[in-house]
Amino acid sequence: MRRPLFIIFLTVFVNLIGFGIIIPLLPFYAETFGASPFAIGLLFAVYSFCQLVASPALGEFSDRWGRRPILVYSLLGSVLSFVMLALAHTMLMLFIARIIDGLSGGNISTARAYIADITEPQDRAKAYGLLGAAFGLGFILGPALGGIFGLISYTAPIWVAAALTLVATVIAWLWLPETVHRGQAAGRSALRVLPELLMRPGLRVLLGANLLYWTAFAIYQTTFALFGEMRFHFDLTETGYFLAGFGLIGVIVQVTMIGPIVKRFSERWVLIIGLFCGALGMAAATWTYSVWWFAVTLIPAALGVGLCNPALLSMLSRAASADEQGRVQGASSALSSLGRTIGPVWGNGALERFSEATAYESAALILVLAAVFAYIYRPFSEPSRDVATPVGR
């Protein structure tokens, strides 16, 4: 199990370095084409909307045909998208590039299902913590590399992202073993069975929390560069370094803390605590005009993300049977994509129409609502683990 887990970690890690380069760069790059904050929000949203359309089907196909070919296809789509971004001369080309990336963007949901295939239920929170660490490491090196290569030009980091994603594709093609036999899965798309999944009481609440969480995080992530530019006059390099610090905190949490915390407390309570930490960090960011205090607000925000991601993913995997992991993860990714479609449009629109603080205030409120969903959740399909182990026992 260790070798496949390491290979999927390495694949996702290298891919997310490329993705991490693009996140802080895209707002500044789009501004050179005359894009408004709302148009920048649409650039982020169209990618996620296309994922909303494609990811459930990709999850189903990964059940039927195997994880590996779908993962390779998704990575190749990202390479093509990055090349088009670097060669773009109009906003239309930027949108087409984002659409292509979104339609092929099933790599993360496929990786989640792959981990569910090769781990036992009690080990999945830790395994998803490693996947979260890949996110964190990608968002350390990615934004930092974006800031460094951005000193050359805005297109230089994009070419670096394309090259790194191509490396991830080669890793997945050559060394990632398959886990699913062709023909194993049922033939219905996850999008079509989403109403059926939502009929299950536990999944309904959990998927609702998932939607709210990703809506809030998308607001925070896609307005980060413009928030820093408007309030602190950050450029690409400074934005990249701050996001790298955010990623570093997330890695520390997910590598060193998530396993022991989940063993002492239930995943449900870890999720609730993480959501409140994230809300605190986002709300506190709206109150400060000091760069140093803004840096401090990254700590609870990153702590929240570090706790929420593996706990939420593990809870979703436990709510699905072995032969529907791809379908449930695909449905989860579809709702995540819906959140990442709503979040940028609302967040960047609110930033343009009202103020940069409005976006973060709304994100904090949404996280509090997600915490309410997590609080009322009960794992209806399995014995309850929701009673925390008392400290010191």
Image (cartoon, rainbow, N blue to C red):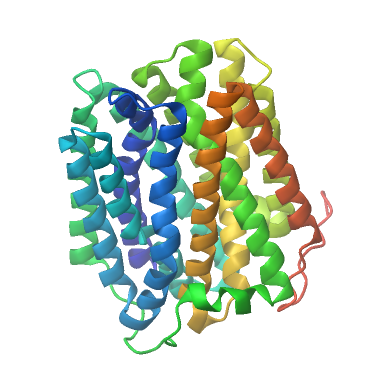
Q: Which residue is at a point 44% across and 88% down the rendered structure image?
A: 186
Answer above or below: position of 275 versus 232. below
Q: What's the residue at 52%, 22% (across, down)?
A: 227
Q: Tell which of 119 and 345 is nearer to you.
A: 345
Would you place residue 168 above or below residue 94 in this image? below
- Closest to the observer: 372 or 39? 39
Q: Nearer the viewer, residue 207 or 97?
A: 97
- Count of marks, rendered view: 0
Residue 345: x, y in percent?
51, 40
Q: Tell me: 141 left or right of 303.
A: left
Instruction: From the top left corner, tell me how far across and down residue 361 is, in percent.
Output: 68, 30
Q: Quadrant of residue 290?
A: top right
Q: Would residue 192 be visible to someone looking at this image?
A: yes
276 horizontally vs 77: left or right:
right
Placement of 286 over or under 135, stated as above or below: above
Residue 22 in the figure: left or right of residue 229:
left
Quadrant in the picture for the C terminus: bottom right
Q: Position of residue 190 (x, y in %)?
A: 49, 75
The picture quadrant where one finds residue 17 is: top left
Residue 257 makes an appearance in the image:
no
- Quarter of the image for residue 105 reads bottom left
Looking at the rendered image, the quarter that the N terminus falls into is bottom left
> What residue lies at 45% left-to-right and 60% top-to-bottom?
52
| 109 to 155, vertically: above or below | below
Q: Residue at x 38, y 36 (%)?
A: 23
| Left or right: residue 12 compared with residue 281 | left
